[in-house]
Image (tube, rainbow, N blue to C red):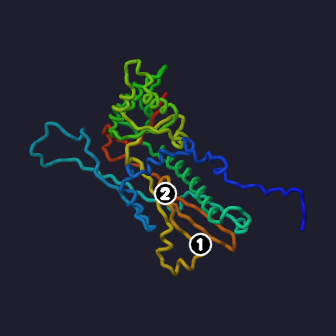
Amino acid sequence: MSYSSLLNCENLQVSLENAWSDPREWGGMARSHPFAEWITAPENRRAIVDQVSPGGGKLRTVTVKGWQSICTDAVLENQPNPNCAAEGSLNQFYRDYTIDTTQNLQVQINMQVSQFAEACEGNGDILQEHLRRMIDALDAKVAEMIATQSVALAGGWSAAVTGVTDDVLAITMVNPRDYFAEITALRNAADESGYPNEAAVFGGGLARQMFQAMNAGCCASSGVDLFEAMRLYGYAFAYDRDLNAAMSIDENAMIFAPGAIQLLAISLAPNLSAFGQTVMDASNFVWNTMFSPRFGVPYDLTVSNNCGAISIALTFTGRTISLPEDYLCPTDDLNGVNYAGKIIFK
């Protein structure tokens, strides 16, 4: 037996959350993705999503088609009646929608079984925390992808709207700012372009200041109730860091009608189980579907154990799509409007 006046205590290990409070769980702007959550919400979802990816690991190419409207310049005056020599034709538009399954986003982790033996935490807790952090990372990357692709998919504004350059609506800011003039300019342009009352605006700091000022009623002394103006003229607004980062210096906000932008996503994992237990038993990996707790979209989880080397991969397969832009005749005021519009406050 050995003796000592005092034995040193081993290092006490506690989690950041238990010892303090994990700032990563506080939320706030830096860790929220309001635009991606809005795009994936049931209120925004349209039938095209399930038609392209009906489930069970199956993928379809869906052709969306329709008839173009007839422009008013095709309506003639003072023509023979009856007319047995009519001219003209009705054009049909179509667009194919599908998913390229080779284009995906993936986060990977590799670990050794021996590492589990040396850790204080339970093996299940370690694996669960790895998966949670992988989901967080993939969620953030999917939100970035949705924002980047949505900016690229933006359409134009009505030909009747002034102050539009290269499909970007300019909202003039005076000094001091006239928030009532700014919100009415935005609302009038959206009305001219056929946006519904339920449209949502996402953007950066300049747009946020306008909506914050109207909520605060900062300028009621001027005789204009800005909060009432916002109630009457819309819209819902959220600051989104992903969309703000995806936009160029030529725009700093965007407006969207519900359903105009859709996220197509597919899980390929069900294809393995669909072959039956014999094929499943012959595999040396597990391939399952998980769902993002933030967005509800499917992620493919692959786990393999190669003689104590554990490999984990989490994969998102999908892309963002928009409404067809050619559903109206070329001379229609709304030709090119797909209800995802760019704005610049300047």
Mark 1 element type = strand
Of labels 2 and 1, the one closer to you? 1
Q: CA distance from mark 2 to mark 1?
A: 23 Å
Residue 1 spot, x, y in % from top left: 89, 68
Tell me which residue sits at (69%, 72%) in the image: 308
Q: Quadrant of residue 163?
A: top left
Q: Quadrant of residue 214?
A: top left
Residue 112 spot, x, y in % from top left: 70, 67
Residue 2 spot, x, y in % from top left: 90, 65
Mark 2 element type = strand
Query: Is residue 42 rendered to the left or right of residue 67?
Result: right
Front in this rendered view, residue 265 or 158: 265
In this rendering, is residue 339 above or below 272?
A: above
The residue to which callout 2 is attached is 318
What amino acid is labelled 2 in the image? Gly
Q: Are marks 2 and 1 in contact (CB under 8 Å)?
A: no
The residue to which callout 1 is attached is 285
Tell me which residue sits at (55%, 69%) in the image: 287
